Amino acid sequence: MKHILLATSIVICLALVPLVITKEYILNLIILVSLYTVLSQSWNILGGYTGQVSLGHSTFFGMGALVFRYLWIGGLSPYLALGAGSISSLLLASAIGFPAFKLKGHYFAIGTLALAMIALITVQNVFPGVSFIPPQYLKGYSLFPIYYMALILGTVTIVLVYGLSRSKLGLALVSIREDEDAAEAIGINIFKYKVISMSLSTLIAGLGGGLFSFYVASYYYYVPFDLGWSFDPVLISFIGGAGTVAGPILGSLVFVILKELFAISLGQINVLIFGIVFIFTVLFFPKGIIGIPKLLQKKKLSVVSMKEI
Amino acid sequence: MLEVENVDVHYGDIQALWNISFKVGDGEIVSLIGSNGAGKTTVLKTISGILRPTKGNVSINGIRSDAIPAHEIVEMGVVLIPEGRRLFRDMTVFENLELGGYIARARPLKNQNLKWIFEMFPVVENRMSQLAGTLSGGEQQMLAIARGLMSEPKLLLVDELSLGLAPLIVKNIYDTLKEINRSRKMTILVVEQNVRLALEIADRGYIIENGRIIGEGKGSDLLKSDQVKSAYLAIG
Amino acid sequence: MLKFFQILSYGIINGGLYGLVALGLSLVFGVMNYLNVAHGGLIMLASYVTFLIFSSLHIDPFLSILLVTPAFFVIGWVLFKVLYQSLMKFTEGEKIKNSLLISFGLLLIFANLAILLWTADERAVAPWYTGKVFDVFGVRLPYTGLGGLALAITVIIALHLFLTRTYFGKAIRAVSLDHEAATLMGINVNKVCLVAFSIGFALAGIPGVLTSLHAFNPAISFDLTNKALVVLILAGVGSIKGVLIGGLFLGAVEAAGVYLVGTPYREVFGLILFVLILMFRPQGLAGKKA
């Protein structure tokens, strides 16, 4: 209960921010955190809760961006375009994503990676060049609608994942992650639930792509398909805490802050650092940042009860 | 040769063996009998070092072996012919045999051991360049044993060799084992579900039930005992 | 017609390289069930090392193989000892998932480290024979390509002999098939994994030298990993001969793609083939079921 109160007050505060703070820098940061949160949560549903490690989410992120861009510049209202982009990601998933479930473990990961690479190269060749915002939009470009879209999407995503974590569906997904064979044995239709999981995941990834497109004025068409968008959510979710609601949020926060700190230096040091932290996380803090308090608690208990961890 | 004292073994949190104690003397054939799931394979896996006892100890010729890594126990002269044979199916018969003689002291003796093995199991010689996975069940079992013999073990552990094989072939193989025991004085510990066979070749036997040893005696005596008869031979 | 043979010969030359690229990955995966997604990153680093050796010491890349290979062997040895300890505490299923994640993390680290150290600019090693070709009935065969092909064939034959004619090589194959049975032969499985892992690293050094002869930058980490994975799946796990065949097959498929559709989509053909094989014949063209 108090979580919900806390969360609601945070959302309200965030909603009021643009009315008080005019520094664009802060607004940009919040938008970015929200963007990464949306993308990471989308990965989290499939990878964190259901245990299917996908290295190809950039495909669906990119798809959402692509469709949004065309529809929005073509005159459609942003939120409708957003919805369309999201659904197109889902459609793409049904064509190439669901069949990928034939693959298990390693093979699923590299299969999705291959799909992402195919998507990237195809877009680079079919849509070369830059996508520009038409001049009339550029004149009226303001961070306000972008900020609110980011806030809405972020909130919706978090609420969705929260609801998932407390639902029977969420339970089914987790059981698949923990032990597929056992889950099947108790009557859970593995394929059906994986499909549901991927559907939710790609829908949200598509929303994220749309947000990206709404936010970034002009970019090469292939940019939202870049593999970084596949890798970052994996890093973020794990470091924050895969399979939790707050994990990807925290992870995104840290990620964006690091990005800012090192923005002036060459290359992507934030990814380098995250890569190193990621490895440490996998080896020593499998539950991510979220799990640290519990880990410390356990250590304290073990001293008292002399039980081996 | 082998001494197992008060051994407990766990699979994770689940206990499989309670206070197992028994001995195998030099040159003996000892059989460990019991029904499915009684713990027989667990005992052999513990002796060969694949599992570690959570309590108690195992000694081979007076030297404690329960903390020694499994591959070094092979060098001590203890070889397990595992349940299901575990041949390298994608490698040839010859390569399987070579790997049987992998340890350093066995390598120079490869050719002479091969000769000996061909005498014991002539069918193996015929199939040298075939892939192990293409052999029949009986041939595979023979190969598995032949492979184990390549390192000239002092103690041979045989796990459920009769599984899935025709009775005549099984008898054949046991006769060969008995001959090896006689001519080479090789100590053999046999684990078998087929109680009659196991006790017929054994000098001594132990009965294991639910992870505990519940009986022991000379092979011939056990074969006649009421306990064994009613529990395992469906007589009386 | 000439164009066809030209493209085909490039395809074969590339195929040899692809086989080399996948060799280390295949070996390690077969022995330890560890899919080293960072393999491409290692090859990329080896290219940079070769470049540095060439620019400072002017040693021919084909010769610097003698330096790079043992160095990478040692790096692999050390890395294995460091990581292996920490992985031990996980269950089998977790080990596999975590090792995939770790190698993924390493791939990102390698790529970004390279960008940091050497920027994303392209480099290439250009010894005296760069650009020189043999002209065979109008088909141009570059010296570097032929040298690479010869190297690939040599290494693969050498590895094959090692695995089939030496005790330790057979031990490696045994461990790939059945860890427990190998232990029962008196084989120290940990040591075999350690050596195989190190050989895998050394086998990243060799193709790295070759890739340095053409324009490269940190991004090739991903391309090379992708190639290695494709060849691995084509070849099936545990088959060294299959790796060469798989590599050549990939080279041929790409050549066909270039001939039919043009260069930009070269990668896509291989990738589509990859996905198809993953779905319908995961044991590959030559190997056994993974």
Image (cartoon, rainbow, N blue to C red):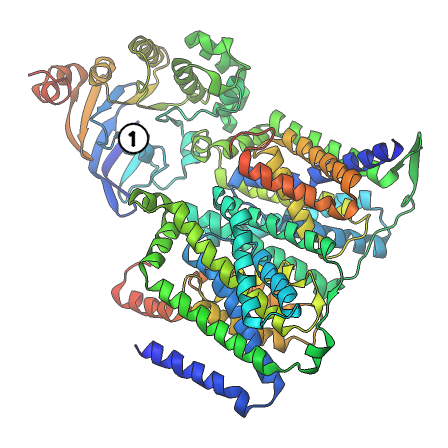
How far across and how far down the image is residue C126, in percent? Answer: 87, 50
Answer with left or right where residue B92 lies relative to residue C235.
left
For the residue pair B180 and C31, the one nearer the viewer reads as C31
For the residue pair A227 and A307, the one nearer the viewer reads as A227
> Among all residues in the image, which is located at the extreme front?
A75
Answer with left or right where residue A222 lies relative to residue A80.
right
Q: Quadrant of the N terminus of chain B?
A: top left
Q: Quadrant of residue C254?
A: top right
Q: Quadrant of the C terminus of chain B?
A: top left
Q: Quadrant of residue B24?
A: top left
Q: Disc 1 is attached to a residue of which chain? A: B
- Residue C21 in view: yes
Mark 1, residue position = B41
How many residues crowd around disc 1 within 10 Å: few (fewer than 14), some, or many (20 or more)? some
Residue at x 65%, y 58% (from the top left corner): C110
For the residue pair C57 and B181, the one nearer the viewer reads as C57
Residue at x 57%, y 47% (from the top left corner): A110
Q: Secondary structure at mark 1?
A: helix
- Residue A282 in view: no
Residue at x 85%, y 56% (from the top left corner): C55
Q: How many numbered marks, from 0 up?
A: 1
Note whether C288 is above or below A295 in the view shown. Answer: above
Q: Quadrant of residue B51?
A: top left
Note whether A35 is above or below B159 in the view shown. Answer: below
How far across and how far down the image is residue A17, in percent? Answer: 51, 87
Note whether C111 is above or below A135 in the view shown. Answer: above
How far across and how far down the image is residue C259, in percent? Answer: 79, 38
How far across and how far down the image is residue A218, in percent? Answer: 70, 71
Q: Amino acid at mark 1?
A: Thr
